[in-house]
Image (cartoon, coloured by chain):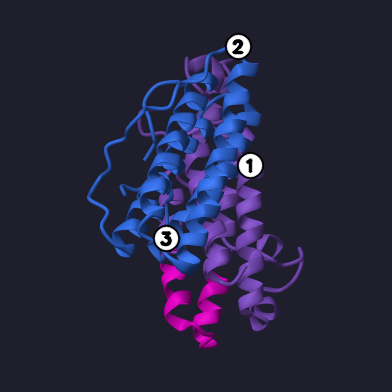
Amino acid sequence: MLAASAAALPALLATAGCRSSDAFAGPDPLAGRPTPSPDVITLQAVIAAERAMIALYQAAVNKELRPADEIRGLLAQHRQHLGQLQARLVLPPGVPTASASPGISPGTSPGTSPGRALGRVSIARLRAAESASAADLVRRLATVPPALAQLFASIAASDATHAVALGG
Amino acid sequence: MAAGSGPVSGIQALQAALAAEDAAIFGYGVAGAHLSGSRKTAAERDWTGHNKARDTLTAMISALGATPVAAQVFYRLPSRVHDAASAAALAAYLEDGVTRAYLGLVAVSDQRLRRFGALAMQSSAERAAFWRGGTQAFPGLEAS
């Protein structure tokens, strides 16, 4: 019995007339993945949007948009944003992490393919994406704890300065 | 990276923002004396903006039944201001202080104050970037 695998445990418990939740005082380990809290879902969405922003900037770098040094500097700050956001996200093993998706690419309509969207990268597109990101982060403040709200607000302020730096 | 420790009331955070605005009003008076041309015009524009912000905060604090903190007669500056470069550095320093103060508002439970603080710190971060000549990754959370 001691050698029984975790997969066999439900059957063993059923045989004994027990549910797995009867055997443990804490969360049921056999109930599947825990549902993420709303602020975790929000953080995942913000991380995905930040990744999409970085992809947009990387496309601008690849396209050699000018001013190149300015764009590289702003890209570096977005990578710092992503690092701080990811540091706040702790997920159980096996839970998929957020990734850039077409539906949340900054300044892009939902459903637009990333390749097509990045092909149209321009300074105006970067500027619009920065402004949209700043506004989106402020909208999300209400649903997150204070410390995360401060990080969102700081990143939003950074994005607002980026928009101005790009001529906004 | 949190700006403070422990819960802060809306009134406390508003008072801190008001104190920062008062300091900025004083500091811009010093900085402006060492600027000329478009930079002086920008300093005057920002000084006017901080006066308006002070009036707004004063009204908000009064509406909550508290007495707005009074401005100090004199503020100790971080360094001597003797030319346009040091004046611009002072302006950036002042804006960083204002940004940090508004970041405190973002941590309160009142959602309207959170939004107000977040939008106000965007304005001060933009002014800081202007005077500094560059952007920051984490306005309000970075040491100036």
The foreground one among B51 and B128 is B51
Mark 1 closeness class: few <14, some 14–19, many ≥20 residues within 10 Å: some
Mark 2 or mark 1, which is nearer to you?
2
The subunit letter for the residue under badge 3 reads B
Mark 1 or mark 3, which is nearer to you?
3
Measure the alpha-carbon separation of dots 1 and 3.
29 Å
Chain A painted colour:
purple
Measure the alpha-carbon separation of dots 2 and 1.
29 Å
Q: Which residue is mark 1?
A: A140
In the picture, the disc for residue B131 is 3
Which quadrant would the N terminus of chain B be assigned to in this image? top left
The subunit letter for the residue under badge 2 reads B
Question: Mark 2 and 1 residues: CB-CB less than 8 Å, in contact?
Answer: no
- Please identify the residue farthest to the bottom as the structure is shown: A64
| Image spot of residue A95 (x, y percent) | 52, 47
**Prevailing SS of the magenta stretch:** helix
Q: Earlier in the sequence, mark 3 or mark 2?
A: 2
Q: Which residue is mark 2?
A: B65
Question: Mark 3 and 2 residues: CB-CB less than 8 Å, in contact?
Answer: no
Q: Which chain is blue?
A: B
The subunit letter for the residue under badge 1 reads A
- Please identify the residue farthest to the left as the structure is shown: B80
The magenta stretch spans which residues? A55-77
- Is residue B19 visible in this depiction of the protein? yes
| Image spot of residue A80 (x, y percent) | 40, 58
Amino acid type indicated by mark 2: Gly
Amino acid type indicated by mark 1: Arg
Per the image, label 2 sits on a secondary structure element best described as loop
Amino acid type indicated by mark 3: Trp
- Asked if marks 1 and 3 fall on the same chain, the answer is no
